[in-house]
Image (spheres, grey):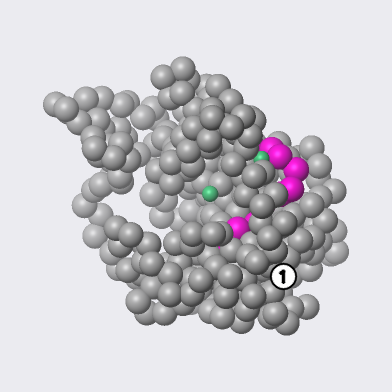
């Protein structure tokens, strides 16, 4: 596998002939991630449990990684094109030691321990000067491309900033340039006042449906306190991770009253070791970018086409979606 850059959109694409990736993963007889597994993948780090369980959360090497940790990216030209080796990290972040303990069924303390693992893994990988960005994402349900049944989120560290984040970084910078304000703080202020698209506010965190959703019931979780980097926020104000965990659990519970399948992604600042003049989004990044979580539910068999469409289409308005999610009964 290698990375190729589309010279028009400037997006990096993973390209290669690896036909095994097109097949569904073989169903193992036993879960490789449960504490008693005989053939567990290599553990990277563990968060101890406070309640007598073998562990609270754990990072493991992905059994069939998209990116390889060894070597240099060796970026090079190919005529007018750019290519580089698919160097990076690919980890499975186990949310709980118990096989059936998904985020919406876990205790707030358990989710807090998991979020601490996420913050620690991002901080650790950002020490590696090869990596420009650390992505944290969760695919749940068959239509979302879920790979393992054990409760898990995945992480990749890459030598490039993924396209969607790059768009956000550039847009946040441009908004700041004209208004000298963070666009996310402005969204929070307007949505909090209007209430129409708000789902829940909880101790410094807000769950809302964005004004122009890419998919029905798209939901964002945004901290009220401005910070560009999730891990800096999480590790300096660890007390608030339990509140974030509680809102995450309740929001997923709400979404699961509509559909079980969803994508979740954490958007946060890139690696400051790559503060580059030519990229241009670094000058005001700490002021103009604001970390957040995006949840994209998958509501029907047609859902997949949403992502491939040139124009996003949501047959449920954000106002209706927010009302239904607000009214959902959660524990
Ligand atoms: Zn398991
Ligand atoms: Zn902000
Ligand atoms: Zn985002």
Position of 78 with respect to 202 (left or right) is: left
Specify whether tag 1 is near ligand 3 (CB below 8 Å).
Answer: no
Residue 22 against residue 315 in the figure, above or below? above
Query: Which quadrant holds the N terminus?
Result: top left
Position of 2 with respect to 256 (left or right) is: left
Q: Quadrant of residue 243?
A: bottom right
- Residue drawn at x 51%, y 71% is 317
Residues rendered magenta in the picture:
219-228
The residue where tag 1 is placed is: 250
Q: Quadrant of residue 209?
A: bottom right
Other residues around mark 1 within 10 Å, as few (<14) / some (14–19) / many (≥20)? many
Q: Is residue 225 magenta?
A: yes
- Residue drawn at x 66%, y 56% is 191
Q: Which residue is nearer to you in this view: 250 or 118?
A: 250
Number of numbered callouts drawn: 1
Query: Which quadrant holds the C terminus?
Result: bottom right
Q: Is residue 283 magenta?
A: no
Position of 288 with respect to 224 (left or right) is: left
- Residue 170: give x, y in percent of width and height: 46, 35
Residue 32 against residue 226 in the figure, above or below? below
- Residue 120: give x, y in percent of width and height: 68, 42
- Residue drawn at x 63%, y 34% is 181
Question: Does dot 1 land on a helix, a strand or a loop?
Answer: helix
Q: Which residue is nearer to you in this view: 211 or 77?
A: 211
Residue 15 seen in this snapshot: yes
- Residue drawn at x 57%, y 51% is 266
- Residue 144: give x, y in percent of width and height: 44, 68
Task: Give the residue furthest to the top.
Answer: 277
- Residue 314: give x, y in percent of width and height: 43, 70
């Amino acid at each position: 596998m290698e990375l190729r850059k589309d010279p028009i959109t400037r997006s990096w694409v993973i390209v290669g002939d690896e036909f095994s990736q097109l097949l569904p993963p073989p169903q193992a007889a036993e879960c490789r991630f449960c504490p008693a597994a005989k053939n567990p993948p290599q553990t990277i780090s563990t968060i101890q449990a406070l309640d007598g369980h073998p562990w609270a959360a754990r990072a493991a090497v992905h059994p069939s990684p998209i990116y390889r940790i060894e070597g240099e990216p060796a970026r090079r030209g190919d005529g007018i094109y750019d290519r580089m080796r698919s160097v990076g990290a690919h980890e499975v972040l186990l949310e709980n030691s118990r096989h059936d303990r998904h985020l919406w069924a876990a205790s707030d303390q358990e989710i807090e321990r998991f979020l601490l693992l996420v913050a620690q893994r991002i901080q650790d990988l950002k020490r590696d000067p090869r990596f420009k960005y650390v992505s944290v994402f969760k695919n749940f349900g068959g239509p979302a491309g879920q790979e393992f049944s054990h409760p898990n989120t995945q992480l990749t560290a890459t030598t490039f900033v993924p396209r969607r984040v790059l768009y956000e970084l550039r847009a946040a910078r441009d908004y700041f340039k004209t208004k000298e304000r963070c666009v996310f703080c402005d969204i929070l202020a307007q949505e909090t006042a209007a209430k129409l698209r708000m789902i829940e506010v909880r101790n410094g965190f807000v769950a809302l449906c964005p004004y122009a959703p890419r998919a029905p019931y798209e939901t964002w979780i945004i901290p009220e306190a401005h910070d560009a980097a999730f891990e800096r926020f999480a590790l300096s104000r660890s007390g608030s991770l339990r509140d974030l965990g509680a809102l995450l659990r309740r929001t997923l519970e709400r979404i699961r009253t509509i559909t079980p399948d969803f994508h979740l992604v954490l958007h946060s600042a890139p690696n400051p070791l790559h503060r580059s003049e030519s990229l241009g989004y670094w000058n005001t990044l700490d002021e103009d970018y604001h970390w957040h979580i995006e949840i994209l539910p998958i509501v029907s068999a047609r859902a997949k086409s949403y992502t491939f469409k040139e124009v996003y289409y949501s047959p449920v308005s954000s106002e209706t979606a927010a009302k239904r999610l607000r009214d959902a009964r959660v524990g």
